[in-house]
Image (cartoon, helix red, strand yellow):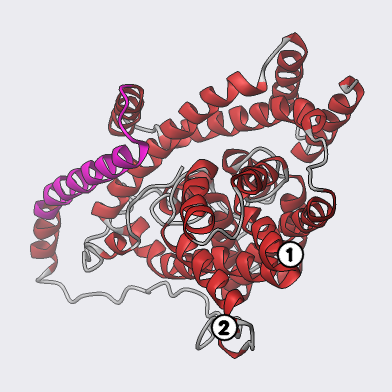
Amino acid sequence: MHSAASPFPLLILMNDKEVLPPAVLPQAKQPNDQPGTIGELALLFLRLGTVSFGGPLAHIALMEDEVVTRRRWLDRQHFLDLVGATNLIPGPNSTELAIHIGQLRAGWPGLIVAGTAFILPAMLIVLVLSYLYAHYGSLPQTEWLLYGVKPVVIAIIAQALWKFTRTALKGAFAAVIAIATVALVASGRNEVEVLILMAGIGLIAGGIKRAKLQPEESETTKQSDAEPPAETPVATPPKRWTPAFIGVGATSLAVAPPLWHLFLIFLKIGSVIYGSGYVLLAFLRADLVQHLHWITDRQLVDAVAIGQVTPGPVFTTATFIGYQIAGLPGALVATLGIFLPSFLFVGLLSILMDRLRQSVVMRQFLDAVNATSLALMGLVTYQLLHVSIINVATAVVALASLATLLSTRLNSAWLIAAGAIFGLLCHP
């Protein structure tokens, strides 16, 4: 779930130099905090992009299993902070999460490689389906695949939510935020409005908490005035290669005006959109169906269906539409346009993230956002149950998958493959 907030509110209170004392600030444990390699990032996110059916929640659950539980690149609190922060910027949450993990492991090159590797498998699959659709006018039958995969995805999400709950709801404040979120959304309030409201409450609570800490800090300062200040080693972040600019050479491409127009349309959508594939549907219909008449309503619905049934980010819907409008060049230009803002937003967010996590005010802000995000994820999972668990057979698959995940360290990809085989066997 995305919010309608701008990334620029993240700049608020960035001059707050008060930091949590060691007894209050949760220290991020990173047992495997050595810089990663480009190769390991590429292999991991290529695999995740190939098997990550089920939408953003499933993608996040798979990433948590890989980077927190198995590889221990991040602790769960740090991972949750990234999930909460990506809710505050436009674009596809799970893709932005992959981009940010890549930046943490291997700097700016990792940012580009992880995001591209996660997007690439879905883009290639959608390109093949786009070709078949353009030549045969219909979509391949995929109901059998989703029949077996959906209950497995529900189990994967449920396991991740259980892990997140123990980390995100670590105090009364977070629990009240989560309960209030559920109540407000259940009463009909918009999820985006609720996220903004709870984030504001987090900022206020953080300001109050900082005000309470200041008298203690002043007393400590007075006691230390008579003593010469001892030099305290300052931890400096590891040096990473930072390019003078991040670009793809788009300005030097000699492309026809229709392709430029197509690129700008998808760049605009990628820069402002929050929400699910249905929100994307509304944006695309307004520009491409009603205004420009480049595609039909049927093609648009089929495009969103393609994005939903293929692994990886649903925003690869842009690949399908671009292909229908201008062939392979159109597919590539549309894909670049809709995903490029995510790389830029995460690049900005990565610069601010350490400061966000250490400030008293912004720590409380992140705690509120994390609790709200968890509650929204739980609500979406509840809604997905009705379309995923449709009979006794799918219920058994979901329960068996959940029991396997909780009792073993079996990689989720194997369960997804087993679910696909189950769906094939049940297909008439």
Q: Position of residue 345 (x, y in %)?
A: 45, 66
Q: How many marks?
A: 2
Residue denoted by label 2:
241
Q: Which is more N-terminal, label 1 or label 2?
A: 1
Q: Quadrant of the C terminus?
A: top right
Mark 2 Cα shell of 10 Å, populated few (<14), some (14-19), many (≥20): few
Kind of residue sitting beneath label 1: Ala
Element at label 1: helix
Q: Which residues are magenta?
A: 187-215
The residue shown at (64%, 43%) is: 298
The residue shown at (61%, 75%) is: 259
Mark 1 Cα shell of 10 Å, populated few (<14), some (14-19), many (≥20): many
Does residue 205 belong to the magenta stretch? yes
Kind of residue sitting beneath label 2: Trp
Instruction: Left or right? Give the position of 145 relative to 10.
Output: right
Whether 85 is drawn above or below 186: the answer is below
Instruction: Left or right? Give the position of 59 relative to 174.
Output: right
Quarter of the image for residue 310 reads: top right
Whether 361 is drawn above or below 144: the answer is below
Quarter of the image for residue 398 reads: top right
Q: Position of residue 78 (x, y in %)?
A: 48, 51
Instruction: Left or right? Give the position of 9 relative to 42.
Output: left
Element at label 2: loop
Q: Nearer the viewer, residue 416 or 167?
A: 416
Residue denoted by label 1:
42
The residue shown at (61%, 32%) is: 157
Whether 168 is drawn above or below 284: the answer is above
Q: Nearer the viewer, residue 68 or 186?
A: 186
